[in-house]
Structure formats: C-alpha cells, structure tokens
Amino acid sequence: MRNILLQLPATAFALCLSVFLATSCREDHIPTYSGGARIQWLTRFVSDSLRVDFSFTSLTGGETSYVVELPFKVIGPATGQERTFTLRQADDDSGLPAAVEGTDYTLPERLTVAPGALQGTVPVTLLRTAALDTVTKRLALEFVTGSEFGPGARLQQRAVIDFSNQLSRPSSWDYIVEWQDWGVWSRGKHLFINQVLGKPIADDFFLVTDATLLRIYLDTLKKALDRFNNDPDNIASGKAPVLSDPNDPKSAPISFSSQSV
C-alpha cells in the first residue's frame, strides 16, 4: 500500500506534464492579429485626440512658413512594401475660419508608410498670411479609409491644428502645468517668459523639456520677476508690475505659483 501511495503523485505529475506539453505544442492556441491594417493619429493617451496650437510669433527669423509634424501609427503587421494613405479636410463646428489648402497650408503629394514601419509623420506646411494677424485659422484633418487601411480608434481619427500670428497658449501648457508653479497661461506671462529665456517657448515646450531644466527655468523666472517688479525705474514708468494682459491696466499682475495668472 505504501508503494502505491508514493507512486500516485508521480503518476499524476507525469499526466499533467504530458497534457501541458501537448496543448502548448498546438499552434492554434497562440493568439494572432487577423484583422486588416488600421491607421490613426499617435497621441500621448488613448483618451486624447491630436491637437496642435501654433503661433508664428514663436519664430524669430521672419519665416513665412512652418512645418508641423503630425505623428501617426498603424495597427496590424508591418509589410515589406510601401503603403499609401490619404487625408481629407474634415468639417468643423468650432466657429474658427477653416484653413484653405494652397493659401494657408500645403500637404505632400503622396502620403506613405515606409516598408517595415508601423509609425510615421505627416508634414503639414503652414503658411504665414496677413489674415493671421487678426484671426486664428483651423485645419482639421482625418484619414480616408480604403483598401490599404481601415479606421483606427475613433478619437484618434482626427487631427486639429489651430494657428495664427498671435501669441497663443502652448497646447502642452495643460492643467497639470497650471497646478505647478507655472500657473495659468496669460499673454503677459508668456511674453515675460520669452523675454527672460531669450527665445519663444514652443508648443511642446512642457513635453520635451527635462523636468530638472524646467525647475531651473522656473527659479530663474521667479527671480527675474521679483527684480523687475521691484526696480524703481520700472515702478516709476508704470512697467511694473508685469500684468497678465499688457493691454488692460486693470488686469491682475502675473506670478509664478499654482493656479495663478
């Protein structure tokens, strides 16, 4: 009886092992992607749509055009051949004037996904016109699905570019930045930052700048603002304090603290 009891666990183990090996060798149990290729814009989070805010005021060399790179990704297996896709200008109910192709922007003649690639960018050339001095124009682009690609995630089917020749809030200056000591965006604060740093801050400034460097910038700005606001000449001339709206003398002074203007 003792020998039988000792043999039972070994027999059960051998049986389980043989079943595991048999099932693991069956290739039809390995999940594979069987759907067609799909294409969508590439965003930081699944719940985001692709949005870019751009102002020609961020360029200091008098440039009359600027290329915005819109990232996209393909869902599905890569192929060894170049694949093409098409974009169209989407309807928009924002109330902003729609950009006109050839006047306000241009797209490449061919849009392709490189062989073996699952990601890429669409270069959109924005054109600087006199109208942008007074209005913000909107370009909404969406994929045209066809034989090569089906639609990807719904929220990532549309990309929006708002552009002007006026100072505008960088899209990376979001609510997370507002809760930090950068505070809420304002025109006066933006102009002051550009002046102190000696260069315009780009639309993706808070995304691509190292966290340590952002802290150094912030410390520099706080000290510069304190010096400027306490300078007797600036006080006497009415330049101090720096206001959130340079055109409104009743607007609040800027500061670098959470949720401040």
Image (cartoon, rainbow, N blue to C red):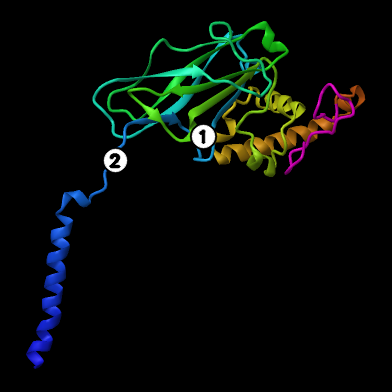
Characterize the local packing of mark 1: few (<14), some (14-19) or many (20 or more) Cα atoms within 10 angstroms: some
- x, y (%) of residue 52? 57, 26
Q: Mark 2 — residue?
A: 33
Q: Quadrant of the N terminus?
A: bottom left
Residue 155 badge:
1
In the rendered structure, which disc, 1 or 2, sits on the residue that comes first in sequence? 2
Q: Quadrant of residue 140?
A: top right
Seen as rendered, the residue at the extreme right is 236
**From the viewer's perspective, is residue 166 above or below residue 184?**
above
- Closest to the observer, 252 or 51: 51
Secondary structure under tag 2 reads loop
- x, y (%) of residue 260? 77, 40
**From the viewer's perspective, is residue 104 above or below residue 113?**
above
Spatial CA distance of label 1 from label 2 is 22 Å
Q: Amino acid at mark 2?
A: Tyr
Q: Quadrant of the C terminus?
A: top right
- Closest to the observer, 245 or 115: 115
Q: Amino acid at mark 1?
A: Leu
Q: Quadrant of residue 53?
A: top right
- x, y (%) of residue 177? 65, 40
Q: Residue at x 67, y 14 (%)?
A: 165
Magenta residue span: 240-261
Q: Is residue 197 left or right of residue 108?
A: right
Was residue 118 drawn as part of the magenta stretch in this picture? no
Q: Residue at x 73, y 27 (%)?
A: 192
**From the viewer's perspective, is residue 155 above or below residue 1?**
above
Q: Is residue 21 left or right of residue 88?
A: left
- Closest to the observer, 179 or 232: 179
Q: Residue at x 63, y 42 (%)?
A: 176
